[in-house]
Amino acid sequence: MSNKSLMLQGTASSVGKSVLTAAFCRIFKDDGLRAAPFKSQNMALNSYITDEGLEMGRAQVFQAEAAGIPPKACMNPILLKPTGERDAQVIVNGKVYGNMNATDYHAFKPQLKQTIYEAFKQLQDESDVVVIEGAGSPAEINLKENDLVNMGMAAMADAPVLLIGDIDRGGVFASIYGTVMLLEEEERKRIKGVLINKFRGDFEILKPGLKQLEELTGIPVLGVIPYGSFDIEEEDGEAARLKSTLIKEKALDIRVLRLPRISNFTDFHWLETHPSACVTYINKADEVGSPDLLIIPGTKNTLADLAFLKEKGIDRAILRARDQGSMIAGICGGFQMLGTKLLDPEGVESQIGELEGLGLLHVETTFFPEKITTQANAEVVAGCFYDEMPAITVGGYEIHMGKTRLNRDVKPFAMIIDESGAPTRADGAVSEDGKVWGTYLHGIFDHEDFNRELLSFISDNENMETMVHRESFLEYKEKQYGLLAETVRKSVDMRRIYDILEGSCQ
C-alpha cells in the first residue's frame, strides 16, 4: 500500500473525530504502515511549536504521537486562533498571516486551496496512508461554498470518507441520516461507512436501529465503538476536563482559572493524573478560595482576560489567596498578568493600551507585533521553591506576543539553555519565598521531576508517601494510545476499512 488516504468526518463537533483519527493512525502504525494525520483547517486555542519554530494545532500533535512520527506544520496548514466572537488570528504553514474577521476569512479561503493541497501532497509523498480529519459537519450548508475542510478536502485528496456519529449525546440516527441527506449525490458517494461512537448499553437493543439506518442511507455501519476509559488529550475548549473534577482523597487542592480565552489547557493534562493532585477549573471569584496552588494559564488575549479578572473581582480573590498562603503560578499570559504593568502601545492584542497587573511579581510586559514561537530547554533555577531544591532540566515551547522585563531585584524562574547546557537567557520570574512564580514555558508540568518538587513544596511534605516515582508522561501516553487502538480495532471491521483504502468497496 502506498499514498492512500482515509477521511473521518462527523455529524457535529466533539463527536470524536480527533481521537478516532489518532486511533486509526496507531492501528495503521501497528500494522506496519507509515501513517500520518492531516487536518486542513483547525480552529483551536491549544497549539504547539514544532522543531522548526512553526505553530500547529495540538490535535495533530497527539495524532502524530499515536502514529509514532514527529509533528509537522504540514499536518495542519491552516490554524485559526479565535481572538474574539468574530475574529481570529490566521496561521498559514505555521506562521502568522494576520487577523481576520469571519466575513473576510470566508472570502479569503479560495486563496488557501493550493496551500492546503501542497501540504497534503507533501505528507502523502512521505506516507503509506494519510488519515484526514474533518471539522464540524459536512452538512453545514451555509459554509459549503469554498469548503476546504470537509467534502471540499475529500475531493482535493480523492479520499473515501467514514462518517462518525456520537450516540452518547442522543439522536445519533437522525444526525447521521440528516447529514447524509443534506449532502449532494457526489458527496454521498464518498461516504463508504458509518461509525457509531461513544456507545454505552446493550448492543442487541441497538442492532435493529443499525439495520434500518443502513437501509435508509445505503451506507454500511462499520463499527460501534464503546465509550472508552482511555485518557487522550482533548483540544476543544468545551472539553469535559474543564467542566468536571475527579475528587481524590487527601489530594492537594490545585485550581486553574478558566479564562474566557484560555489556551493550551493541555499544559495540565499530566498534572491532572497525579495521585496527589486534585485539579479543578474555576471562573468565579468565590471559587478561588485558598487552594494549595492557583494557576493562571495561557490566554489568546492577555489584556482582555486580565480586564475580565478585574471586572469580576477575581483579581482581588487571587490576592487574598496569596495572603492566605496559596502558591500562585502563571503560565505564558498568566505570567504576564502577575506583573506590575502590561503595555500594548501598538494595539497588538486589543485597544486597551495599558493595564495594571496583579503586582505579585516585579516584572513589566510590553507587547510587540512579532510572535515568539520556539522550542526551548531550560534549567529551573536551583533553590527556586526552597533553599535545598536542586536545579531541574525541563523542555517545552514558547508561544507568545510580548516581552517581559524583570526588575533588578527579581530572580528568574529558569534559564534557557543551548544544546551544550550553557545558559543563553532568563525565563520567567519567582518571588523571594518561592510562592509566586511565572514562566513562558508551555509543557513544564509534563516533567515528573519538576512536579515532584513542586507538589512536595506546596504540601509541606505532608503527602510525601503518594509522591513516588511515576512512569514518564511519554510512557503513560503510549499506554493510552495502545488502549485506544485496541478498543477501536475490536469494535470496527478493519477488513472492510482496508478494502476501502484499496478502492475495492464501492
Image (cartoon, rainbow, N blue to C red):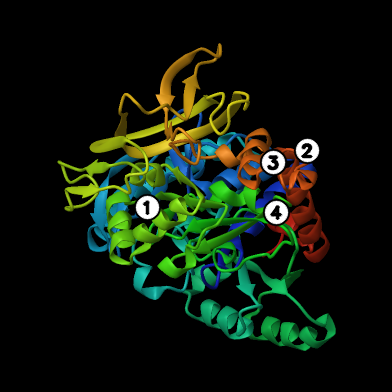
Question: Residue 82: which quarter of the image?
Answer: bottom left
Point out the frontmost of discs 1 and 3: 3
Q: Which mark is residue 222?
A: none
Point out the frontmost of discs 1 and 4: 1
For residue 169, side relative to residue 374 (left or right): right
Give the residue type at disc 4: Ala
Helix, strand or loop for disc 4: helix
Note whether 53 is above or below 135 in the view shown: above
Residue depicted at 32% across the width and 44% down the height: 359
Q: Position of residue 308 (x, y in %)?
A: 31, 62
Give the residue type at disc 1: Lys
Give the residue type at disc 2: His
Q: Which residue is mark 1?
A: 81
Separation of marks 4 and 2 at Cα, in angstroms: 29 Å
Q: Which residue is mark 4?
A: 23
Separation of marks 2 and 1 at Cα, in angstroms: 37 Å
Q: Which residue is mark 2?
A: 469
- Location of the C terminus by quadrant is bottom right
Helix, strand or loop for disc 3: helix
CB atoms at circles 3 and 4 under 8 Å apart? no
Separation of marks 1 and 4 at Cα, in angstroms: 25 Å
Query: Can the viewer see residue 338?
Result: yes
- Looking at the image, tell me whether mark 2 or mark 1 is earlier in sequence order: 1
Q: Which residue is mark 3?
A: 473
